[in-house]
Image (cartoon, helix red, strand yellow):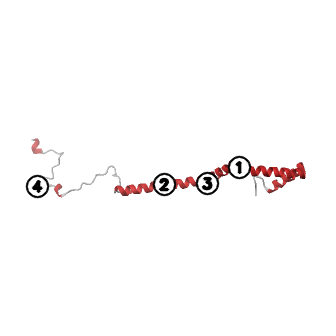
Amino acid sequence: MEILGVGPSEFIFIVILALIVLGPKDMQKAGKTIGKWLRNIVTSDGWKMFQQTSRELRTLPNRLMRDAGNEINQIGTEINNTSKLSGSIPYHTITPPRPNQPTPIIRTPADKPNPSAPTDIKANESDPKQDA
């Protein structure tokens, strides 16, 4: 277990050094002073704001992903609703015309060719009788 990046063996070493340097009586005063100082820091508004900001930064990636997923779902729902309201064919069922392909001619009964009209004369060819 680490506290502020200091492991248990390092902490024991620091306590032994403080005991040698300060002595047993001054260790009590130093301990009380450090305890009061840490309590003031932990109960201060700045520390609470620091902890809240730290918590928000840890949860930021999850929140951003959740918000992006919600926006994508909302956009998809709007697209579906719009296509249903307009009564149009959904985009994926519309096939674009293919280039360089003739369009089929649909004939109606009124468009049937006249059987008495000559069908072997083409419009581009000239009639030899008319040329003479």
Q: Secondary structure at mark 4?
A: loop
Of badges 4 and 1, nearer the viewer stands: 1
Q: CA distance from mark 4 to mark 1?
A: 106 Å
Mark 1 or mark 2: whose residue is earlier in sequence: 1
Discs 3/4, front: 3
Q: Horizontally, is 19 left or right of 55 in the view?
A: right
Q: Position of residue 68 (x, y in %)?
A: 52, 53
Q: Is residue 18 left or right of residue 119?
A: right
Which tag is nearer the camera, tag 3 or tag 1? Answer: 1
Neighbour tally class for label 3: few under 14, some 14-19, many 20 plus, Cα within 10 Å: few
Q: CA distance from mark 3 to mark 1?
A: 23 Å
Residue depicted at x 51% and y 55%: 69
Q: Quadrant of the C terminus?
A: top left
Say which label, 4 or 1, has the lower sequence index. Answer: 1
Comparing labels 1 and 2, the label whose residue is closer to the camera: 1
The kind of residue on which mark 2 rests is Ile
The residue lying at 77 percent from left, 49 percent from top is: 37
Tell me if label 3 and label 1 are in contact, CB under 8 Å.
no
Checking the image for residue 72, the label placed there is 2
The 10 Å Cα crowd at callout 2, few under 14, some 14 to 19, many 20 or more, is few
Q: Is residue 20 left or right of residue 103?
A: right
The spot of residue 7 in percent (x, y) is 78, 55
Q: Could you say whether the residue bearing mark 1 is in a helix, strand or loop?
A: loop
Q: Is residue 12 in view?
A: yes
Quadrant of image for the N terminus: bottom right
The first of marks 2 and 3 along the sequence is 3
* Mark toward the start of the polypeptide (3 vs 1): 1
Sequence-first tag of 2 and 4: 2
Q: CA distance from mark 1 to mark 2?
A: 41 Å
Q: Tell me how far mark 3 sits from mark 4, CA to CA.
A: 85 Å
Tell which tag, 2 or 4, sits nearer the viewer: 2
User: Residue 59 — which label?
Assistant: 3
